[in-house]
Amino acid sequence: AQSVTQLDSHVSVSEGTPVLLRCNYSSSYSPSLFWYVQHPNKGLQLLLKYTSAATLVKGINGFEAEFKKSETSFHLTKPSAHMSDAAEYFCVVSERSNYQLIWGAGTKLIIKP
Amino acid sequence: DADVTQTPRNRITKTGKRIMLECSQTKGHDRMYWYRQDPGLGLRLIYYSFDVKDINKGEISDGYSVSRQAQAKFSLSLESAIPNQTALYFCATSEGGQVINQPQHFGDGTRLSIL
């Protein structure tokens, strides 16, 4: 069965420093993986997706993620945090064998001035 | 105007009441979804519909029902609301094709409180 684990419920970084949000997945088949962002009192927006093409995926707002099959990881990174990045981030996995998206529990990103 | 619109945005009601949450979209997508979000649990799928005549149960459909009135409209009903259905509810849409490759587009959510 597929599952997603976001390893940190909260991550706090200073503005201008790198961001790392960690995600591990479990999947029986070749998965597709997504990162979504949720700003306070708003819906969810797609940041980026991996669908078996290049393992390094670039998304919006300077974020990127690297698919590492050997580590079953899909960590989200950004070189320099901005105050507007403060939000909750969700890692999502989907298998080719069924329709479902399986959501991680989320990581709250806090940006310190 | 938002591409995916949910109404109401907030609702407080009492145990045992019937409640309907509505979702409409202007994206022209065939596929629509209802999720609930609880703190620390991420999103869980309640129901999904791949077209007007195709409705399927998700992970947590008990206590809920849906209606796909048209391609653009997908409503969620709680027949007899109970307090543990207090949550943030999201409607989403996606294009057809291979499900796994299609990103989903979300409304801003409905915050539902059941007393």
Image (cartoon, coloured by chain):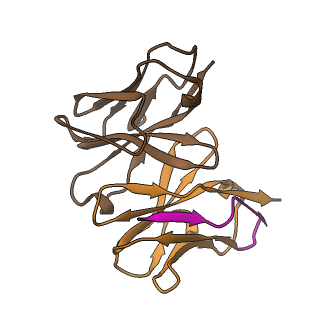
Residue at horizontal 27%, vertical 64%? A97
Residue A58 in percent (x, y) is at 48, 73
Residue B2 visible here: yes
Q: Colour of chain A?
A: orange
Label total for image: 0
> Can you say which quadrant of the picture contains the N terminus of chain B?
top left
Residue B5 in the magenta stretch? The answer is: no
**Would you place residue A91 above or below residue A70 in this image?**
above
Say left or right for A53 vs B108: left
Q: Which residue of the protein is positioned furthest toward the left in this rendering?
A: B53
Say left or right for A14 vs A77: right
Residue A47 in percent (x, y) is at 49, 61
Q: Which residue of the protein is positioned furthest toward the bottom in this rendering?
A: A70
- Which residues are the magenta region? A1-18
Residue B83 in percent (x, y) is at 59, 24
Say left or right for B11 vs B5: right
Q: Nearer the viewer, residue B16 or B28?
A: B16
Q: Residue A13 is drawn in which quadrant? A: bottom right
Residue A17 in the magenta stretch? The answer is: yes
